[in-house]
């Protein structure tokens, strides 16, 4: 558990440093990273769910990201009253370039592990992320 806490703290520090480097808010960076994992455009409601923000805060986040040129809004072909959000092509390039060295360093940290060990690490990360989301939801409901 101690190492897990150290990992989390180090990643929060890294995320803030990356956001500072890109001159954006750390929440904006997290949203961009989550959007990059999505298979297509998502609604602002989906962004609220992914980030744990309220719908109003998610709308303001999308407004900020759009103003910064990091996302674009599209009309939803299924419902013209609703907008969908996706990463702007320039965002992938801008963020991707900033990730080149860190990505290489993280990959090097995993080089000594075999496929079975990597599967265990991936399983742990997946389970830990699920626990984190569940605990965030629990805490939000208690507030």
Image: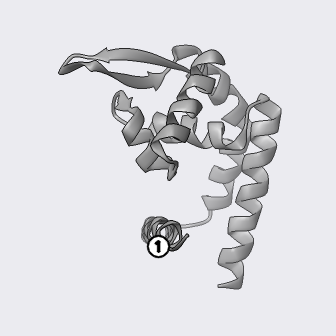
Q: Quadrant of residue 97?
A: top right
For mark 1, give the secondary structure.
Answer: helix
31 lies above or below 80: below
Q: Is residue 84 visible?
A: yes
Quarter containing the C terminus: bottom right
**Which residue corresponds to the image point at 44% horizontal and 24% vertical from the top-left?**
86
The residue nearer to you, when weighing 89 against 99, is 89
Residue 53 in the image: x percent, y percent? 52, 48
Residue 71 in the image: x percent, y percent? 53, 21
**Which residue corresponds to the image point at 76% horizontal and 51% vertical from the top-left?**
14
97 lies above or below 122: above
**Which residue corresponds to the image point at 68% horizontal and 36% vertical from the top-left?**
99
**Which residue corresponds to the image point at 59% horizontal and 15% vertical from the top-left?**
90
Q: Exactly how many numbered labels are in the figure?
A: 1
- Picture colour scheme: one colour
The residue nearer to you, when weighing 9 against 73, is 73
Residue most extreme to the left: 78
* 8 sits left or right of 65 in the view: right
Residue most extreme to the bottom: 1
* 108 sits left or right of 79 in the view: right
The residue at which mark 1 appears reads as 138
* 26 sits left or right of 71 in the view: right
Residue 60 in the image: x percent, y percent? 57, 31
Quarter containing the N terminus: bottom right
* 106 sits left or right of 116 in the view: right
Residue 136 in the image: x percent, y percent? 52, 67
Q: Is residue 69 visible?
A: no
Q: Residues within 10 Å of mark 1 (few under 14, many from 20)?
A: few
43 lies above or below 70: below
């Amino acid at each position: 558990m101690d190492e897990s806490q150290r990992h989390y703290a180090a990643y929060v520090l890294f995320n803030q440093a990356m956001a500072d480097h890109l001159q954006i808010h750390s929440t904006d960076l997290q949203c961009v990273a989550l959007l990059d994992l999505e298979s297509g455009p998502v609604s602002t409601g989906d962004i609220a769910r992914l980030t744990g923000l309220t719908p109003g805060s998610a709308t303001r986040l999308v407004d900020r990201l759009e103003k910064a040129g990091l996302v674009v809004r599209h009309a939803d072909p299924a419902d013209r009253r609703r907008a969908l959000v996706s990463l702007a092509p320039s965002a992938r390039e801008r963020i991707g370039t900033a990730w080149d060295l860190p990505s290489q360093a993280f990959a090097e940290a995993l080089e000594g592990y075999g496929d079975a060990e990597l599967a265990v690490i991936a399983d742990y990360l997946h389970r830990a992320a699920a626990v984190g989301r569940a605990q965030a939801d629990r805490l939000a409901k208690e507030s």
